[in-house]
Amino acid sequence: MSKSLPRLCALMLASGIANANDVSPHKVGDALSTEDAQAMLSRYARRPQQPWHEPDPATIPAGPDGDAIREGMNLMLHTSQRVGNRAPDESKRLNWNSLNCVNCHQAGPSGLPGTKKFALALVNAVNDYPRFDTKSGKIISLEQRALGMFGSAPVKMTADKPEFQAIMAYLRWLGSEAKPGQAMEGVGLLPMKPIARAADPLRGKVLYANKCQSCHGADATGQRKPDFDSGGGYLFPPLAGNDTYDNAGHMFAIPLLARYIRASMPSGTQADRPQLTPAQALDIAAYINDDSMPRGQAPHRIRLYPDAALRPQGFAIPEHFVNQPKAYRRAKFGPFRNVNENY
């Protein structure tokens, strides 16, 4: 399978559909000044936007190239069983947790992972990278972003692993019919109307019990499948504990989590028919991300978002507010200047 990937990439390059976001004059790995980073972010936000489009699964080619795409799709659907930290084959434990990629990059009506609108859709990922990453302060590639998702696994995931190559083959195919160099409607997070008050974790606790607990559990640690210990993963994924995002993850920012929740939760919600108000989504996110909720700790988080001028709202950690409890709470829960800020 891994031998087929160069052929697939060459085919895409030849047909002009593997063009990525233009970051010139910079290149992957460059750390940018505040001024250059702001210019890059502004240019990225101004890209023309194309209508939502995803390829038909029937167009997946036969032969080795198609096999690579289908393998990548399978890995995203069954990550825990295939490469999770409890996968039956210990040599394949390439992911740090027992989640499936599709738990976050949800499937739309087609069943393809990464095709649900505003649920971290991946249909245009090939055009969204390289890009400036405020979290690291550098230009990163799609491959770097994808590798980072596997974290500190029992077995290190690397770009030359056949599993990683298959996932990249799937992502390239998923964006194969997108217009090069453009953004796409429905990708990213669902915009929300501004909320004048701070997010309230106490209100969120009541809302969580009424709207989320039946799936994600009273303690928010999800519902495990019967074969969890042998890699089966979750029926409903955890939102707290040590098997989900830690206190430095993107989802740990309340505005970001709120926009994701509103577009896709409770189960069955579609972005064009949200069941929660913006205020309700913010309150639920505040409860889930409250510091009293058990969660993995990231000792490196003080090094993240190194440029304070580019640090997004909601990334509030005590290390930035020594002896300033009120300022810390204000930064964490708002009111937020712009709930639709990009991350």
Image: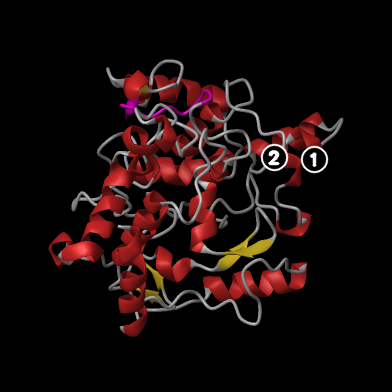
Frontmost residue, 125 versus 48? 125
Q: Name the image quarter holding the C terminus.
A: bottom right
User: For this rendering, which residue is in front, 221 or 289?
Assistant: 221
Q: Give the SS element for disc 1.
A: helix
In the rendered image of this protein, does residue 274 appear above or below residue 10? above
Identified at 57% across, 56% down, the residue is 341
User: x, y percentage for residue 301?
Assistant: 70, 40
Pointer 2 and pointer 1: residues touching (CB < 8 Å)?
yes
Whether the magenta-drawn stretch holds residue 190 is answered as no
Q: Is residue 307 left or right of residue 197?
A: right
Mark 1 surroundings: few (<14), some (14-19) or many (≥20) residues within 10 A: few
Q: Quadrant of the N terminus?
A: bottom left
User: Residue 172 falls in which quadrant of the image?
Assistant: bottom left
Tag 2: amino acid:
Ala
The correct choice, above or below, for 202 with respect to 268 in the image is above
Name the residue beneath numbered marker 2: 316
Q: Report the Cα–Cα distance between label 2 and label 1.
A: 7 Å
Q: Which residue is mark 1?
A: 320
Q: In this view of the protein, which residue sits in the foreground, 232 or 134?
A: 232
Which kind of residue does numbered mark 1 sit on?
His
Where is residue 125 drawn, in percent x and y? 41, 63
- Residue 36, by quadrant, is bottom right
Q: From which residue to which does the magenta span run? A: 231-242
Q: Position of residue 227 (x, y in %)?
A: 28, 20
Depth check: 96 or 222 in front? 96
Q: Secondary structure at mark 2?
A: loop
- Identify the residue shown where x is 72% and y is 33%: 299
Residue 224 appears in the picture as rendered = no
Characterize the local packing of mark 2: few (<14), some (14-19) or many (20 or more) Cα atoms within 10 angstroms.
Answer: many
Is 136 above or below relative to 77?
A: below
Task: State the predominant SS element of the stretch in magenta.
Answer: loop
